[in-house]
Image (cartoon, coloured by chain):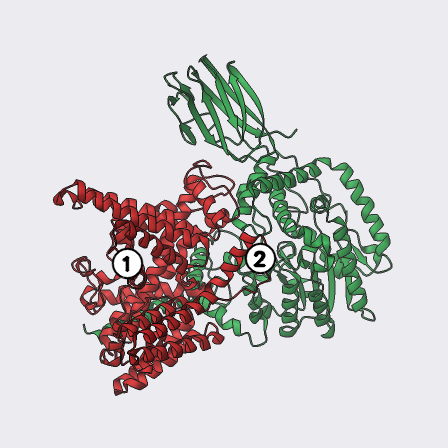
Chain colours: A red, B green
Amino acid sequence: MLFNSYEFIFFFLPATLLVYQFIGIQGHSRIAIVWLIGASLFFYGWWNPIYLSLIILSILINYWIGVLLCGVSKSFRKKLLLIIGITVNLGLLGYYKYTNFVVETLAVILGKEFAQTQIVLPLAISFFTFQQIAYLVDAYRGSAKGYSFLHYSLFVTFFPQLIAGPIVHHKEMMPQFTGGAISRIGSKYLASGLSIFVVGLFKKVIIADKIALYARPVFEAAEQGASLTFFEAWGGAFSYTFQLYFDFSGYSDMAVGIACMFGVILPINFFSPYKANNIIEFWRRWHITLSRFLLNCLYIPLGGNRHGELRRYVNILFTMLLGGLWHGAGWSFVIWGGLHGCYLVINHIWHLIKGAIFDENMAKMNITCCILGRFITFAAVVVAWVLFRAKTLGGAMKMYEGMLAMNGDGISASVNRLGLFGDGYGLVIFIALLLLVWFAPNTYQWAQQHMKDIRMAGLEGEIRGMTRIPWRPNQMWAILIAVLATLSFLALGQVSEFLYFNF
Amino acid sequence: MNYGKFNVQVIAYCILFFLIVGIFNALVDPYLIFRSPLVEGFNFQKPEIDSHTRMTKTFHLKWMNPELLVIGDSSVAYGINPGQGLLGGFRVYNLGLPGANIYELYKYVKYAVNACDTRHVVVFVSLKNFLKNQNNKTDFNDLRLTPFRAKAFMDYYKSLFTLNALSSSFVTITSQDEDYESSRNGFLVYRNNKKFQRTQNRFLVNEAGILVAYLRLQNVIKDNNEKLDYSSFVKLLNISLNNQVKIDIVITPLHAREMLLVKELGLRAQYDIWKHKVLEIVTKRGRGEKNINVYDYANYNECMTEKLPASYDSTKPLNWYWESTHFKPEFGTLIMDEVLGCKKDECYKIGTKLTASNYRVNETNFLLKREMYEKNLVADGNDIKRLIGALKSYLDVSGIKVENAPQDIMHGVLHNAIMHINGDKLVRNGNFNDSRHWYWGTPWTHQRGRAYADGSQKGNAYLSTEVSIIPQNKYLLEFDLSRESGALDVTLGGDTKWGISEGGKVNLSYQVKDSTRTLRFIGNSSFKGSIDNVSLMLSKN
């Protein structure tokens, strides 16, 4: 079930919320938790009931290993249990997500064809696998004790974050399930959640889905081998850059908003990433919870920056390569991750050089540096998104050919009116969206007064004082939210999936 | 305001805005499914019906409750006009569905037979309808045609509460000056695309579209005629006959040019086999039945062989055809008069009532006339050949695969091919009215309506523009050169003409080798002079 579907908005969400609130107000917190788990499994099973058994099995195995890890004191047995747990999780993920990729790669290398059945990727497997690996690691460290099976099940299945994140940490969710969430039931969190949800829905169905109409034909043309001109190729790349931004931002807002309606506070996962002045900052703003997971569970265990600069860069590259592979089983994703790894390494080297050459005051960013930095970062991200979107490396190369003006810089007759710069409104849309992603306050900044509970992840400074018209429960905001909601509901006719559902 | 009140207000405003949109859409009723009052100048004309035929015709059909149903693809929708809803004394509805395949036709006939008092169905068919790979159109939905009409609820909902419906309402209100009245009986008015006002162009555009459809399936059909969907056709016959509904199968008249296209693609034998198979199925199923007939209008009669006006003539219309697939209602009326009115074989002037016994004779006549037509109309044949050649070579070199190329791409490719065949000039702003469309390398400048290089360059002086060219074709480049010193090289599509140093009118012939779409003038280090009136055309030799 998609957040942007009739069945979710008009049936599932109101029904689940009403029953949950009714039970919660009566004070039956355990029944409320059971209701939420049941609703979440129904939500997951709507896509394909067969895979319900997979997620339930995964929960049972991980919880059981977690309990064992908490009860075992001998370090060897503990380590063995952890290895078994991680192997089972990665094994499942590897089988469902990477088997086709490995077989296809082997076929190319060996020049043979293997008979294979296409394995369907179960929804959300990348997300719930990572969440549970983080839980097992903490259970091994002794910092994940005493969770009940009910709470653990809800931690994994809680439907607002189940399908496409954020990748929540047990420490930020479990305390809420043991009482915090139920205590927040009421109109205040409902109002905040509803407003954030509507803004997210608007971003998805009105902005992302519409700008996708500009991106799709360009990338499809590139996949077909068409020679794209400079403006067509850049138009396509910019369109996808905006599409992905508003798609993921929209989804993240909707997830936070829905959870908020249930009194649950999810961590911020998306915080105006195109406002980043360098690529390190970009990764602190884009898919924040994935960055956190990769940092804690991969980069730091690999040694982080503790073994010298060279080793640090190797660790960054390795982490980003795997981060790319997490997004999708394909070489274009691996290269995309590698490219971002290179960006990060260059960024760190630049910081070193800057620190060595300039004194402290000079090294601080002035306004010109900020603008330049933001522009370069944005351009680097746009270039990399081409790999992220292209279905094949060949398609990506065709896009890059066009972006390098290797096919001329006009709007060609052969691919007439293709791309963002191919029609009259395109340039206006481009400028408007650019201003929006570079300068407009984001949802959390609008709702700053009511978002105090949200995990800020070092973004507290940016949350405060960014907008002169903060969200308040008044008539003006009620009308504005209702207008956005009405427009979004009217656009639900053509339901499209969220891009991050594929990962 | 407290939070509870805020929540109530948001929901209340949402409901209010929803109601406003719904009431507005219901009043305008852009698809004519709510039967709202029609007000001149407000919602009387319904232009949006044309683009929502599969939904609207389901509703209209039921209301019209026709005794006679005429069904087929767009050739029927644009070619059979039931006038005020009466034809041959029957209450008639035109159920032409643009792009329909035989499965869709079967489903709609089944729905009509079950939902209406229909006693007679006339089905127009062509080879294209039978292609199995021709998927159902995206707005087709089986659920819409079930007795429970589960989809009808969603149709009502989407006609009230979607942005698409709202947009259709605005289009309806702002399009009241045009005449769409004929849509009531299912007949769609053929609207000329202004871009292709010349009859020649309309034919080419249409043929290009058909060409893509056939190219996509060429190999499939060639290998195996059984890849055509005959089972839906059999079901269509069964559902009619089992309900005592008379059924006439009409083989759609195509313009002779489309038949030429079929021939050039090597599908002529398949076309003949298909036609024979249709007759065979009808004969077999209709044994002992009086209620079933086949009529062949895809023969070389005077309408089908109507000659196109000259390529420069933008005014002369044809009498019987819009282009090679869509015949005009005048022709449609002749067909319907014969199908509904003729009692004796001698009565058929433009079509033939096919039977197992007259099939061979009819076929022999057909082949003779076809040969005569092809001998007499060499120009038309060359047009088709050029179209196929241009498209194929463009696809070959660009690497685009026609089997799965998106519609946007194919549209661009075809436009390109047509532009070439028409001999349109391919250089934009070739007479340098201003500096647009050209890339001015040092020291080229736009001066007094020409491109001028003052000789101050240290190396080469580049002046270039983007052109749409198709590799493996010959092009003629023409320009005026005024030279004071040095020489000029001119490159196009991987072919370079070196050292042009003679002033005056320059004519160059290029054999384009690759897909580089740049026409480049390169003045050498001592070149000083100007160029003007640059034109580039496909060479038809």
Judging depth in this view, the residue of B501 and B162 nearest the camera is B501
Above/below status of B368 relative to A328: above
Judging depth in this view, the residue of B536 and A395 nearest the camera is A395
Above/below status of B417 relative to B154: above
**Residue topped by disc 1:** A303
Where is residue A369 drawn, in percent x and y?
Answer: 21, 43
User: For numbered disc 1, what is the local secondary structure?
Assistant: loop
Label pair 1/2, CB-CB below 8 angstroms: no
Where is residue A484 drawn, in percent x and y?
Answer: 32, 63
For the N terminus of chain B, the image quarter is bottom left
Above/below status of A443 relative to A183: above
Residue B136, by quadrant, is: bottom right
Labelled disc at residue B468: none
Labelled disc at residue B182: 2
Q: Is residue A501 toward the left or the right of residue A371 in the image?
A: right
Residue A172, by quadrant, is: bottom left
Is residue A437 in view? no
Above/below status of B229 relative to B299: below
Q: Is residue B290 toward the left or the right of residue B414 in the image?
A: right
User: For numbered disc 2, what is the local secondary structure?
Assistant: helix
Q: Residues within 10 Å of mark 2 (few under 14, many from 20)?
A: some
Residue B419, by quadrant, is: top right
Residue type marked 2: Ser
User: Residue at (18%, 61%) from the top-left corner?
Assistant: A460
Where is residue A215 drawn, in percent x and y?
Answer: 43, 51
Q: From mark 1 to mark 2, how far is it between C-alphas?
A: 76 Å
Q: Residues within 10 Å of mark 1 (few under 14, many from 20)?
A: few
Residue type marked 1: Gly
For the C terminus of chain B, the image quarter is top right
Q: Which chain letter matches label 1? A: A
Where is residue B472 drawn, in percent x and y?
Answer: 61, 34
User: Residue at (18%, 66%) from the top-left corner?
Assistant: A449
